[in-house]
Image (cartoon, rainbow, N blue to C red):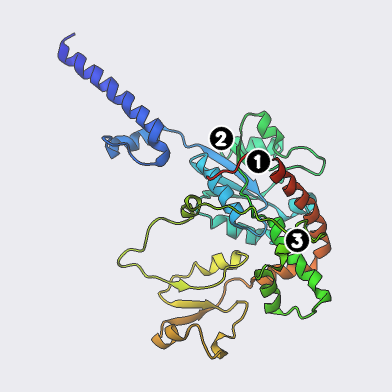
Amino acid sequence: MSKIPSTYLIGGAVAVAVAVGLYLGVAKNGIPPQGLGRGLWRKIKKKKKAVRVYMDGCFDMMHYGHCNALRQARALGDQLVVGVVSDAEIIANKGPPVTPLHERMIMVKAVKWVDEVICDAPYAITEDFMKKLFDEYNIDYIIHGDDPCVLPDGTDAYALAKKAGRYKQIKRTEGVSSTDIVGRMLLCVRERSVSDNHNHSSLQRQFSHGQGQKFEDGGSGSGTRISHFLPTSRRIVQFSNGKGPGPDAHIVYIDGAFDLFHAGHVEITTFDISLVVHGTVAESNDFQKEEDNPYAVPISLGIFKVLESPLDITTTTIIRRIVANHEAYQKRNEKKAASERRYYEEKTYVSGD
């Protein structure tokens, strides 16, 4: 063999090896390595099978912790499939959900890291459902947080996935939980002995001003609550889309406290208008009667419009659901609060990811 062909062969082999090595080492960022053409990069990516991961949950009163869990799960694969547990399954395993299935589906579908959603997922990973995940949905791994998920009979809800070697774990997001949020709402029931004036806005103010921060054990004690909420700037920036509007983009502005984020907040953002907007469903719609109207400027400019809200949900709506069934939620909260305390006592480290 001549020297020239040998050189090309060796050079070609090295190029392929470097390309594969760079791909394996840098592909996580989704950016073509320096010196590797985008055409070749696309061909290499096509040959790589997408890793599909599955995460399920109740996603009741969806909050930052849920979203961060989905972010971490998505980072373990290329595509994230999310199972939303049915109302019946939640009732059987945890008690009544605060938000019904259709509202929980709206919230989960709106999260940017979610690629697919499975409705009416079971609470526990059974053999039949796990087989369905692997065969029909092409799931490679099942994901859950490092906090225990125990069934009423005391068994691990993810035991089968662990036994199959298809289980991966993420860190629990510290300092925010449905238990804490429900606990603050339950305090509204306690305050009835002081004042029975629970109108539409007073419940929301009581919740938002943090009266519930003073109880630690889900509603049965009076200890001071210690916050474990430790978000980092590195983590928060990942919730942004990372880009600003283009020069010809239509910008829509809508304001709100977005306290206790719910499905109504998600649905109102689906409108496509170039105005300052306000929904018909809000904690208070008396702003036009106020002397200092917060929308006076856009009204004077003719760019203000009141939209018919797609869902009749406010923070007070959610609080009233808790208040109406407070005994069941208090019992569940006491159990969950004890579980959360054990988690913080036994945790080994805090993740910044």
Numbered disc 1: secondary structure: loop
Query: Which is closer to the viewer, label 2 or label 1?
Result: 1
Tally of numbered tags: 3
Sequence order check, earlier mark of 2 and 1: 2
Q: Quadrant of residue 310?
A: bottom right
* Distance (Cα) linking label 3 and label 1: 25 Å
The residue lying at 59 percent from left, 68 percent from top is: 264
Q: Is residue 74 above or below residue 91?
A: above
* Distance (Cα) linking label 2 and label 3: 42 Å
Instruction: Give the percent coordinates (x, y) of residue 33.
Output: 32, 36
Numbered disc 3: secondary structure: loop
The residue positioned farthest toward the top in the image shown: 1
How dense is the environment of label 3, judged by Cα within 10 Å: few (below 14), some, or many (20 and up)? Answer: some
Q: Is residue 349 left or right of residue 189?
A: left
Q: Quadrant of residue 59?
A: bottom right
The residue that label 3 is drawn on is: 215
Amino acid carrying mark 1 in the image? Asp
The residue that label 1 is drawn on is: 146
Numbered disc 2: secondary structure: loop
Instruction: Give the percent coordinates (x, y) of residue 232.
Output: 52, 51
How dense is the environment of label 1, judged by Cα within 10 Å: few (below 14), some, or many (20 and up)? Answer: some
The residue nearer to you, when weighing 51 against 243, is: 243
Sequence order check, earlier mark of 3 and 1: 1
The residue that label 2 is drawn on is: 140
Where the N terminus falls, by quadrant?
top left
Amino acid carrying mark 3 in the image? Phe
Q: Is residue 166 above or below residue 71?
A: above
Amino acid carrying mark 2 in the image? Asp
Instruction: Give the percent coordinates (x, y) of residue 6.
Output: 20, 14
